[in-house]
Amino acid sequence: MNAPKRLSSLADVTGAARRPAYDPARHGHGIVHLGIGAFHRAHQAAYTDAALAAGGGDWRIVGASLRSVELADALNPQNGLYTLIERCASKVHARVIGSIAHLIAASRAPADLMTSLVDRRTRIVTMTVTEKAYGVDRATMTVDLSHPAVAADLRSLNNPSGVLGLLTEALRRRRIEHVDPFTVLCCDNLPDNGGFVRCGMIDFARRRDAALGDWIAEKVSFPSCMVDRITPASTEQTREDALRLTNCIDQAPVETEPFTQWVIDDRFPSGRPAWEAGGALFVDNVEPYEAMKLRMLNGAHSMLAYAGFLSGRRYVRDTVAPEGFRPLIERHFAAAASTLQRLPAIDLNAYARQLLSRFANPAIAHETYQIAMDGTEKLPQRILASALEARAKGLDVRPFAFAVAAWMRYCLGRLDDGTRYVLRDPREDEIGRLLSDLVAPSDVVDALHALPHFFPDRLRTDPVWRDAVNSCLRTMMREGMQAALAAEMRT
Ligand code: CS2
């Protein structure tokens, strides 16, 4: 048998992996994606692959990494091809994805990225850059002038490197060159993600040129969407499986779960791929779907990430195992569901059961420490929004107080045995200063409730809420996370 070749052409793929049912080279690009990590390649790129097979069109993706260069260096020699591995207990499926045309490492080639954004063939710009990359203040929906990317881009308007600066500059040039604007599709886990980016961009643009801001407000479409697919970091095993299933060496395979969901506002004035071919659902109002996913899936994820990491559970699947704390996860689902507007098309009990089995997938090694990252960016929409709604409806806030207390315990930066870890949060220095030397649980609760722009006033000043958080954190700090979990399961 011949030694395996590096993946670079579909003709070399001889294993069991499915290959695209179209010739990638015959399709031009129509999308630029900012933040081309594993999630994008497990999700949107797979839908686009299905759309190209079903509906054709020039909709391949130019992917941009805003900071790192590694993925561009791995995928460009492969002509954008990579293996997507789907795992569950009983099977491993692989398919080679052909929807990525090429990659740009923006830190090395900023002009190439700008050229692609201004190119009239680019009709949609999508992004997964994580919550912290935007620099938009959610309370005022205006740009946060203290955000490093926003501040840098306002200083250097023509050479931006942050999301708002890049998109504004590209739209400015398109306007001058009489090129229609692209549609902006945010695929980050934020409520009303389209409206959020729209407000940030209009405010950013108005600061440099009021007429440009007005033009963006009038002409650019910002649909919202809800994205879902659990995608852990790739490992050596991912590479080995890719080799076995393609007979090619793939330097950038991705692994994910079989489940996938994408619910999108259908507002694409310059056209879009037939993403429904991959199962995307187009609706008039994404908001109830977003709230369901953010509060049930992501809310439970954050709770179990802090509680799991601090009680020695490395993976999500360990938290729902018999020796884990599944009843608390089920409790969280039920509490979050009771804050939601009902969707006729969705049975929330069935959704919760499905989430539990997704979390339990024994073939997915999703680290609790990975989900614990960036808590200050995640908790407001995942937990605090539910807590507010529960209070307004007179419902029990304990499940949300428990989740917030687990995050507070995590903010202390050390395990029960004293081992230190890095918080990995954009506000970790500020949190470290607020908490230094504090030993009493109630002082920690007070200090973190004083973190600016974090807790909504209605929670901060609510004694019922504060008491509940205090009571949970007291047990966690005095008896340890494992004992706190056991105690909570007895209540
Ligand atoms: C997770 C999400 O890391 C996290 O914060 O909650 O990435 C989650 O896995 C995805 O939203 C699932 O679609």
Image (cartoon, rainbow, N blue to C red):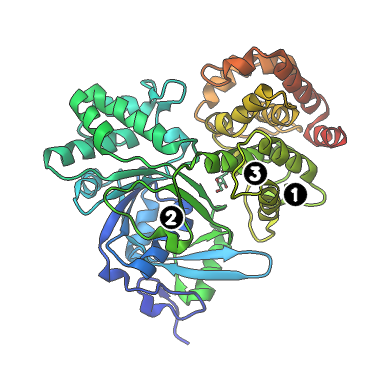
CA separation, marks 1 and 3? 12 Å
Q: CA distance from mark 3 to mark 2?
A: 24 Å
Coordinates of residue 29 in the picture (x, y in percent):
27, 59
Q: Secondary structure at mark 1?
A: helix
Residue lying farthest to the bottom in this orientation = 1
**Left of 114 or right of it: where is 46?**
right
Q: Nearer the viewer, mark 1 or mark 3?
A: 1
Residue 320, label in figure:
1
Q: Residues within 10 Å of mark 2 (few under 14, many from 20)?
A: many
Looking at the picture, how far across and down is residue 356, in whole percent?
Answer: 70, 51
Q: Amino acid at mark 2?
A: Gln
Which callout, 1 or 3, points at the residue further toward the start of the chain? 1
Cα–Cα gap, marks 2 and 1: 28 Å
Q: Residue at x 35, y 33 (%)?
A: 198
Q: Secondary structure at mark 2?
A: helix
Mark 3 C-beta closer than 8 Å to ligand 1 = no
Which amino acid type is shown beneath numbered disc 3?
Answer: Thr
Specify the quarter for ligand 1: top right
Depth check, front residue: 279 or 345:
345
Q: Quadrant of the C terminus?
A: top right
Q: Residues within 10 Å of mark 3 (few under 14, many from 20)?
A: many
The residue where tag 3 is placed is 368
Q: Residue at x 36, y 29 (%)?
A: 199
The residue that disc 2 covers is: 44
